[in-house]
């Protein structure tokens, strides 16, 4: 069990570091990564479904048109992962109940806020409250996923019942 705790701590550090590194990129580099990732996603979907979701446009044009949504989906995804990993770590020390679920959500929202503040100091980047809100959507989704799996799995026996 001790090795799992250590691995979970390392995983949490990796997730935090990855989010920080994405936020630390200037706007040009960040935009290029988003565009390249979007093209890869469209290509993968096309290959799996044997369709052309971009229609008559090139993949690059399609991605450029939808870049805002791709970037916001990335925000949601990285914070889903952060919240799941944080709750996984907390579960080694505390029984996950509503109190710890809320504490985890608050910790992740604080991190998202600090991350957006950090972007104010990066060339061409801005810190936006709407991005914290979008991150919060990911945090809540991840927390709910973790909680549902936790109460339906190994954690079911740990849930405290109110009398």
Image: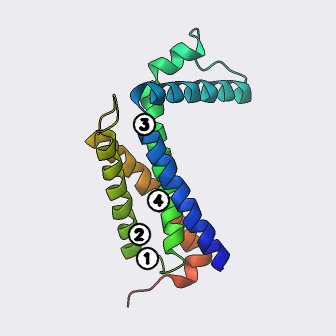
Q: Please tell me how crowded label 4 is: few (under 14), some (14-19), or many (20+) other residues with Cα within 10 Å.
A: many
- Give the residue pinned by disc 4: 83
- Percent x, y of residue 133: 32, 46
Helix, strand, or loop for circle 1?
A: loop
Q: Marks 3 and 1, how far apart in space?
A: 29 Å
Helix, strand, or loop for circle 3?
A: helix
User: Is residue 59 toward the left or the right of residue 87 in the image?
Assistant: right
Q: Marks 3 and 2, how far apart in space?
A: 24 Å
Toward the left, the furthest residue is: 129
Q: Is residue 143 above or below residue 24?
A: below
Q: Please tell me how crowded label 1 is: few (under 14), some (14-19), or many (20+) other residues with Cα within 10 Å.
A: some
Toward the bottom, the furthest residue is: 163
- Give the residue pinned by disc 3: 72
**Split into 4 quadrants, where in the image is the N terminus?**
bottom right
Q: Going from the N terminus, do you reach mark 3 or mark 2 first?
A: 3
Q: Going from the N terminus, do you reach mark 4 or mark 1 first?
A: 4
- Percent x, y of residue 24: 42, 40
Q: Marks 4 and 2, how far apart in space?
A: 9 Å
Identify the disc placed on residue 97.
1
Q: Residue at 55% of width from left, 71% of height from top? A: 150
User: From the viewer's perspective, is the residue at label 4 or at label 2 nearer?
Assistant: 4
Q: For the residues labelled 4 and 1, say whether their Cβ atoms are less than 8 Å apart.
A: no
């Amino acid at each position: 069990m001790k090795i799992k705790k250590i691995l979970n701590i390392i995983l949490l550090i990796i997730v935090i570091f990855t989010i920080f590194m994405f936020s630390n990129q200037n706007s040009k580099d960040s935009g290029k990564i988003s565009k390249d990732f979007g093209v890869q996603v469209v290509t993968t979907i096309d290959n799996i479904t044997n369709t052309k979701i971009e229609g008559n446009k090139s993949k690059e044009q399609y991605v450029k048109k939808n870049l805002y949504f791709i970037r916001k989906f990335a925000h949601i995804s990285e914070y889903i992962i952060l919240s799941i990993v944080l709750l996984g770590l907390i579960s080694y020390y505390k029984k996950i109940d509503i109190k710890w679920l809320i504490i985890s959500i608050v910790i992740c929202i604080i991190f998202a806020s600090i991350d957006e503040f950090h972007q104010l100091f990066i060339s061409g980047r801005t810190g936006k409250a709407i991005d914290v809100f979008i991150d919060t959507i990911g945090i809540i989704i991840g927390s709910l996923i973790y909680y549902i799996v936790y109460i339906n799995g190994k954690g079911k026996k740990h849930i405290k019942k109110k009398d």
